[in-house]
């Protein structure tokens, strides 16, 4: 296991130093449209997002951070590329952290101005390096894009900030190549104690992106590497939060919330199990205070047995189903009442 990383404060949140791994996402609204951005962030908060990032790609977007901050409840990170003035402006208007690449911010003097502002506002800097934008000299040195090159690039940028007297740093090294990303994190974990923001970049659509992220993040986090994560998916960012929470819970790194298990269906299935399982997933999202397992089974033949290890379960039959609690059959109800009786049990759960 990796030694504890440096503690970094991001607004009222803390990462590193053995603190719980926090979940991040990024808005896909136009940041200058404060109303739309706030609406999306509030949905992400409800889903369980701990830290949100938004682009500050023009002056209107940077200034919008002030209005956004007044209406949300989690720290917000400003994503900056190329223009150092936007980095400074975003901090002036309330950004709790900035994400920059020190190599493309416009030279030492401009970077120094950003650093001085970050010191004044007590704002940490996330140094981000993606394999797709690795410097040509490192691609040449390592004969292609490699984990070693990604790590060297990130540490070069960290050293630039350190030379300017700045150490309130979070490092992010990402690649769409899962095994390269894993290898890079293993390398960098041996070379620095700055906290790491972990993710598989450009992972893809929901199915492909979830599989790549689950494998990559699972391999990295299971080694004790990583302090905050993002599951990058092409689509509604709320799905990123749902996936990230499941990854952390599966690895035993986050407690609370209901775990739903369901059978894959077979020829014995005589109810709409797929629809029912999806309805149950949506239902349990409102019960984050419960730390139990709920089983959704497709037949009354194996359902009771398969649900025995769950705290609560429902098993469907021919137009009807069973409510199962702690492995015991409680009652038989019509199929259309299964969801309602399950919800009633959750509302009154005290075991």
Image (cartoon, helix red, strand yellow):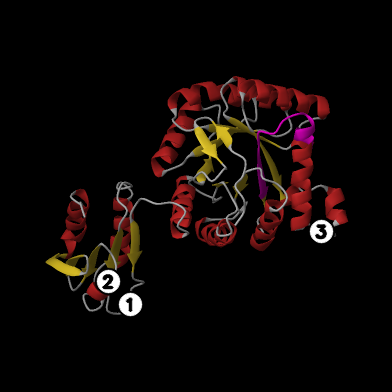
Total marks shown come to: 3
Q: Are marks 2 and 1 in contact (CB under 8 Å)?
A: yes
How far apart are the alpha carbons under marks 1 and 3?
A: 47 Å
Q: Which residue is mark 3?
A: 144
Pointer 1 or 3: first along the chain: 3
Q: Which residue is mark 1?
A: 266
Q: Is residue 266 visible?
A: yes
Secondary structure under tag 1 reads: loop
Pointer 2 or 1: first along the chain: 1
Check if residue 25 falls in the magenta segment.
Answer: no
Tell me residue 351's x, y (percent). Answer: 21, 55
Q: Which residue is mark 2?
A: 298
Q: Which residues are magenta?
A: 160-173
Q: Are marks 3 and 2 in contact (CB under 8 Å)?
A: no
Q: Is residue 321 visible?
A: no
Q: Residues within 10 Å of mark 2 (few under 14, many from 20)?
A: many
Horizontal placement of 118 versus 337: left or right? right
Secondary structure under tag 3 reads: loop
Q: Nearer the viewer, residue 238 or 153?
A: 153
Q: Quadrant of the N terminus?
A: bottom right
Q: Which mark is residue 81?
A: none
Check if residue 168 falls in the magenta segment.
Answer: yes
Pointer 3 or 2: first along the chain: 3
Residue at the spot x=43%, y=33% of the render? Answer: 39
Tell me residue 76's x, y (percent). Answer: 54, 32
């Amino acid at each position: 296991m990796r030694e504890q990383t440096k503690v970094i404060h991001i607004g009222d949140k803390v990462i590193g130093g053995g603190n719980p791994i926090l979940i991040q996402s990024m808005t896909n609204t136009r940041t200058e449209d404060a109303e739309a951005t706030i609406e999306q962030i509030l949905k992400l908060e409800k889903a369980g997002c701990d830290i949100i990032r938004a682009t500050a790609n023009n002056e209107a977007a940077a200034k919008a951070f002030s209005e956004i901050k007044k209406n949300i409840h989690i720290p917000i990170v400003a994503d900056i590329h190329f223009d150092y003035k936007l980095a400074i402006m975003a901090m002036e208007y309330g950004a709790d952290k900035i994400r920059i690449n020190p190599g493309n911010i416009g030279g030492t003097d401009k970077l120094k101005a950003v650093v001085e502002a970050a010191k004044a506002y007590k704002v940490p800097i996330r140094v981000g390096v993606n394999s797709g934008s690795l410097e040509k000299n490192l691609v040449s040195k390592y004969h292609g894009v490699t984990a070693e090159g990604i790590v060297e690039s990130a540490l070069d940028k960290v050293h630039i900030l350190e030379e300017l007297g700045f150490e309130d740093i979070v490092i992010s090294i990402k690649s769409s190549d899962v095994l390269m990303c894993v290898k890079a994190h293993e390398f960098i974990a041996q070379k620095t104690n700055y906290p790491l923001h972990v993710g598989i970049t450009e992972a893809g659509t929901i199915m492909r992106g979830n599989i790549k992220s689950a494998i990559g993040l699972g391999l990295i986090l299971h080694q004790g590497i990583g302090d905050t994560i993002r599951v990058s998916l092409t689509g509604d960012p709320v799905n990123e939060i749902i996936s990230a929470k499941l990854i952390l819970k599966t690895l035993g790194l986050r407690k609370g919330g209901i775990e739903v298990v369901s059978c894959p269906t077979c020829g014995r299935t005589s109810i709409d199990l797929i629809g029912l399982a999806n309805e149950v997933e949506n239902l349990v999202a409102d019960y984050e205070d419960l730390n139990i397992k709920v089983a959704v089974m497709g037949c009354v033949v194996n359902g009771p047995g398969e649900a025995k290890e769950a705290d609560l379960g429902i098993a469907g039959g021919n137009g009807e189903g069973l409510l199962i609690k702690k492995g015991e059959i409680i009652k038989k109800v019509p199929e259309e009442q299964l969801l309602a009786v399950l919800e009633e049990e959750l509302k009154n759960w005290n075991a």
